[in-house]
Each structure stands twice: as C-alpha cells, then as structure tokens.
C-alpha cells in the first residue's frame, strides 16, 4: 500500500485522486494505483507488446528489445526517479508500463501508415490509441468496457509525449488539464532516456552502428571515460557498460534538475502541477543538449539506416492490404470488434484491430485473408 505520509504534497495519492469513471469497492490489500498497475500487466495488449517492433522486428535476435522489454525498462527508470522525488512510485510504474500499449505493429513506421490510412477518419496516434485501449478495446469486465483505470493513470497516457510523437488531441477522452501530473512527466523522461540508451546498444549489437561513428557523441564520450572503456577488452561488456553509464548520468541529472524546478515552482498540490504549461520533470541544459545530439545521431545512423528503411518500405503494403481486406470482410475480425463497427465506425474499428496485432500475427493474417 502507498505510504501517503512519505509523499510530497504535490504527489498523487488516493486522497487527492480524481478516481475512476465507474465506482468500484476498495480492494482489501491493494491500493487503487496498485490495481491499475496490475490491470495493465494482465491486459492482453500488454502481453502483445512482446511481439511488437521497438527498432528491430521480434524474432531477428533474442537480445534485441521489443516494446515489452522496453516498457519494463522504462518502468524501472521511472520508479527510481519517483521514489527519489517522493512521488507516487506505483502510479509512475503503471503509466510507464502502459505508455506504449497503443503502438501498432512495425513500430513508428506502422503508426505512420495507419495515420495515412485513417486520414479521413480522425487519423491514428499511438498515445490516443493507448487511451482508447484502456477505455474501450480491452474488455475483461462484464460491468463496463475497458480497464476502468484511475484518472491520473489515463491522463499519463493521454499526455505522454516524446520527440518522435506527432501532436494528438485527446480532448474527446475528457482531459482538460494543461499538463500531466509529475508522475506522468516522469514517464516521458524515463521513456526518452531508455530508448536512446538502449536503441544505441541494440544498434551496436546489430553492427548497423559502427564504433568509429560515435567518436564525437558527447554522451558516449563521457560514459566511456567514466567506465575506463580503453581498459575493457570484452566488446559486449564495454557496449553494455557504456549504455548503463549513459543511463545513470541522465537519471542523476534528471533528479538534480527536477528538484530545482520543483523547488522554484512553489508547488502545494497536484492541481498546481496540472495547471501549469511547463514541465517540471526535466533534464538539465547540458544533458538536454547531449541527448538531443544522440537522437540526431540515431536518426541518421540507425532509424534511417538503409537496412531498416528497406524493411520499412514493405510495411505500407502489408498494412494497407490488410486494412482494405478487413474493411471488405469484417467477418475476419472477432465478434467484439464486429459489434464495435456499429457505434465506432468500420474504419476506426478495423484500425483498432490492426493496431493491436503483433508483427507476426499481422503477417499471418495477410496470408489467410
């Protein structure tokens, strides 16, 4: 259970929460946010993250990250930051674990394709889709659709943002706050730290990134100096320790910079946080410039690598073909989705169904339909 007397006054607690959309009796030994975390972890959409692309398609190599392993790593980073700042660790963990539930198969390329296919029907954006999943698509209860999560957990999904996200409007989901809670803001920073450090590590593992190309990347240079990389003969150890040293530096910097921002903001409540436009969980100026430099490097040397771009080109044909076939034959979808077409429209429901697929299942559906 959450020890509320140890939380900062601007942290989310069961006492200041805006609760659930549907009333539920308290659980005898789990807090509301523990229940949220558990509902997310037991959701089918969470399990399917194991089969969704992070950078490399699942199955190419057992050591590459998937959306699932990435989400678990984000949660570990988020919990550390929340605990050190006296914020709600369990809420932070729930948001971090679920922040990528709305991602389509085939990573950001799949998301871009679905956005094009849905251009005349409201578009597609994975953060808005995450809210849709926990509010509608998941349906383990007879009393209501969705997981009936706490308001602050859903707000964390709706307001989640990274440099690679395009803008989304989640107003229809009922979120009037300018900003997210500090717990939700932690998920943003933890996500950014995790994917930069770990995508670099996976890029090196794949040999798509060459050692020599990183000679001027500030975060890498700093990390290698800290671990005395020149004295490490094992390449795997050196690669892993470099990633961990970068991560440790960024988390430490986030704690320092965020404490300063929070102290200067003079916060007294959660409402003070959500009423602000600016973020209070941040990286310092130097670390911010360094991680932005790494992001540009990864864009040029990994995400836009010809090997990945070639496989990405196939994704448009795969998803466009499957989208068209399912729109023509909705009997290929489970009954729950077929029923949704009456209230949510054919195209949006087909999009929901495809977005929830793993890479592997999507390809198998193409062969069957």
Image (cartoon, rainbow, N blue to C red):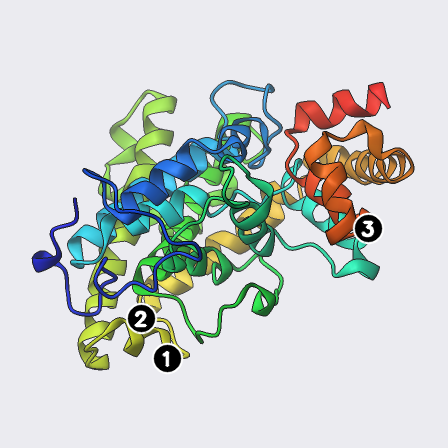
Residue 188 falls in which quadrant of the image?
bottom left
Residue marked by disc 1: 276
Judge left or right: residue 130 versus residue 228: right
Residue 280, numbered circle: 2
Which quadrant does the C terminus fall into? top right
Q: Nearer the viewer, residue 93 or 310?
A: 93
The residue under label 3 is 117
Q: Quadrant of the N terminus?
A: top left
The image position of residue 309, as x and y in percent, is: 73, 39
SS label for mark 3: helix
Looking at the rendered structure, the secondary structure element under dot 1 is loop
| Residue 100 x %, y % | 51, 44
Q: Position of residue 55 (x, y in %)?
A: 58, 36
Q: Earlier in the sequence, mark 2 or mark 3?
A: 3
Out of 225 and 315, give the one closest to the viewer. 315
Left or right, 19 with reference to 143? left
Circles 2, 3 touching at the beta carbon (< 8 Å): no
Q: Is residue 309 visible?
A: no
Q: CA distance from mark 2 to mark 3?
A: 36 Å
Figure disc tally: 3
Q: CA distance from mark 3 to mark 1?
A: 35 Å
Of the residues tagged 2 and 3, which is closer to the observer? Answer: 3
Q: Farthest right residue?
A: 328
How many residues crowd mark 1 within 10 Å: few (<14), some (14–19), many (20+)? some
Marks 1 and 2 close (CB-CB < 8 Å): yes
């Amino acid at each position: 259970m959450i020890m509320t007397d140890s939380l900062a006054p601007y942290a989310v607690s069961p006492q200041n929460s805006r609760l659930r959309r549907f009333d539920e009796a308290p659980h005898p030994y789990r807090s509301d946010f523990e229940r949220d975390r558990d509902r997310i972890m037991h959701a089918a959409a969470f399990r399917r993250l194991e089969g969704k692309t992070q950078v490399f398609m699942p199955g190419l190599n057992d050591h590459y990250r998937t959306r699932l392993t990435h989400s678990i790593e984000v949660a570990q980073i988020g919990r550390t930051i929340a605990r050190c700042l006296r914020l709600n660790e369990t809420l932070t963990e729930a948001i971090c674990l679920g922040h990528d539930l709305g991602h389509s198969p085939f990573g950001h390329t799949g998301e871009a394709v679905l956005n094009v296919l849905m251009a005349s029907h409201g578009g597609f954006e994975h953060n808005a889709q995450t809210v849709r999943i926990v509010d509608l698509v998941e349906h383990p209860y007879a009393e209501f659709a969705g997981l009936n999560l706490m308001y602050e957990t859903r707000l964390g999904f709706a307001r989640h943002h990274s440099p690679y996200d395009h803008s989304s409007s989640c107003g229809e989901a009922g979120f009037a706050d300018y900003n997210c809670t500090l717990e939700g803001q932690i998920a943003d920073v933890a996500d950014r730290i995790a994917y930069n450090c770990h995508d670099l590590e996976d890029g090196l593992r794949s040999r798509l990134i060459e050692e020599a190309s990183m000679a001027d990347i500030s975060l890498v240079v700093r990390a290698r100096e800290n671990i005395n990389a020149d004295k490490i003969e094992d390449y795997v150890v050196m690669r892993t320790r470099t990633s961990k040293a970068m991560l440790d530096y960024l988390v430490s910097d986030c704690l320092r910079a965020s404490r300063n921002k929070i102290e200067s903001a003079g916060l007294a409540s959660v409402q003070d946080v959500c009423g602000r436009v600016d973020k209070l969980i941040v990286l310092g100026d130097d670390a911010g410039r360094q991680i932005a430099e790494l992001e540009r490097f990864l864009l040029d040397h990994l995400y836009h690598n010809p090997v990945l771009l070639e496989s990405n080109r196939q994704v448009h044909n795969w998803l466009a073909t499957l989208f068209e076939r399912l729109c023509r034959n909705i009997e290929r979808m489970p009954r729950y989705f077929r029923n949704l077409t009456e209230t949510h429209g054919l195209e949006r429901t087909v999009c929901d169904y495809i977005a929830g697929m793993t890479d592997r299942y999507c390809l198998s559906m193409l062969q069957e339909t």
